[in-house]
Amino acid sequence: MKSRKGILSCLLGLWLSISFVSVFADPIIRHFVRGSFQEIVASRTGKPFIVSLWSLECTYCFDDMEIFGRLLKKHQGLDLVLISTDAAEQVGEIAKVLKKYPLKQAESWVFADSFAERLRYEIDRQWYGELPRTYFYNAQGHAIALSGKLTQAQIESWIRSTGKKN
């Protein structure tokens, strides 16, 4: 009987430690380099998704992050990709922001090429670096690009247009 209690205690301890780590662990932030954007788009063929470009220096980006955090809770299947245009060396600060809003379940990237203009050009030849910048992709792969602060109503309208339910 003692050994059964010991095993149960060990299993409970292991489960609690795994749960603790998964709740408080830093989000995974991948390095965004040449070819990353094509990888992001190709991996979502036939599915609607949002790409949001942001920076630690962008005040309006944090307003968008707050909205995205709420919507990820409300719409469990929302596919959101966040790309920070900051330097890869700032990954610690970026992780704190993702945890604050809470956005750690979103796929996250950070620019990892010192030639940021090349990465911007690869994303969109019409984008000159203004932030926040958001791309709403439909299931057919067509995107609508918006620069500037978003409203929750804009995003929810797009979600409804994709046919997604809460």
Image: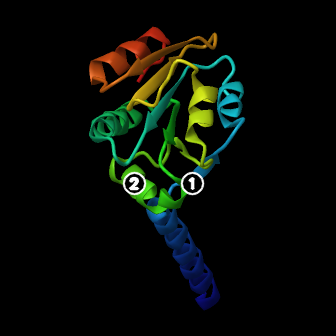
- The residue that label 1 is drawn on is 28
Q: Position of residue 38 (x, y in %)?
A: 70, 29
Estimate how packed mark 1 is, as few (under 14), some (14 to 19) or many (20 or more) residues with alpha carbons within 10 Å: some
Badge count: 2
- Colouring: rainbow
**What residue is at 27 percent from the left and 23 percent from the top?**
151
Residue type, numbered disc 1: Ile
Q: Nearer the viewer, residue 13 or 139?
A: 139
**In the picture, which quadrant includes the N terminus?**
bottom right
Estimate how packed mark 2 is, as few (under 14), some (14 to 19) or many (20 or more) residues with alpha carbons within 10 Å: some
Q: Nearer the viewer, residue 121 or 44?
A: 121
Q: Position of residue 31 (x, y in %)?
A: 63, 49
Q: What is the distance, in whole Å, between disc 1 and disc 2 at their CAs?
A: 11 Å
User: Which dot marks residue 99?
Assistant: 2
**What residue is at 30 percent from the left and 27 percent from the top?**
149
Left or right placement of residue 69 versus residue 85 in this view: left
**In the picture, which quadrant includes the C terminus?**
top left
Q: Is residue 166 above or below residue 72?
A: above
Q: Position of residue 34 (x, y in %)?
A: 70, 38
Q: Nearer the viewer, residue 81 or 31?
A: 31
Residue type, numbered disc 2: Lys
Left or right placement of residue 50 versus residue 34 in this view: left
Work out whether mark 1 precedes mark 2 in sequence or the reverse, and give the earlier one.
1
User: Which dot marks residue 55?
Assistant: none
**What residue is at 37 percent from the left and 34 percent from the top?**
68
Q: Residue 45 appears in which quarter of the rendering?
A: top right
Secondary element at image label 2 = helix
Secondary element at image label 1 = loop
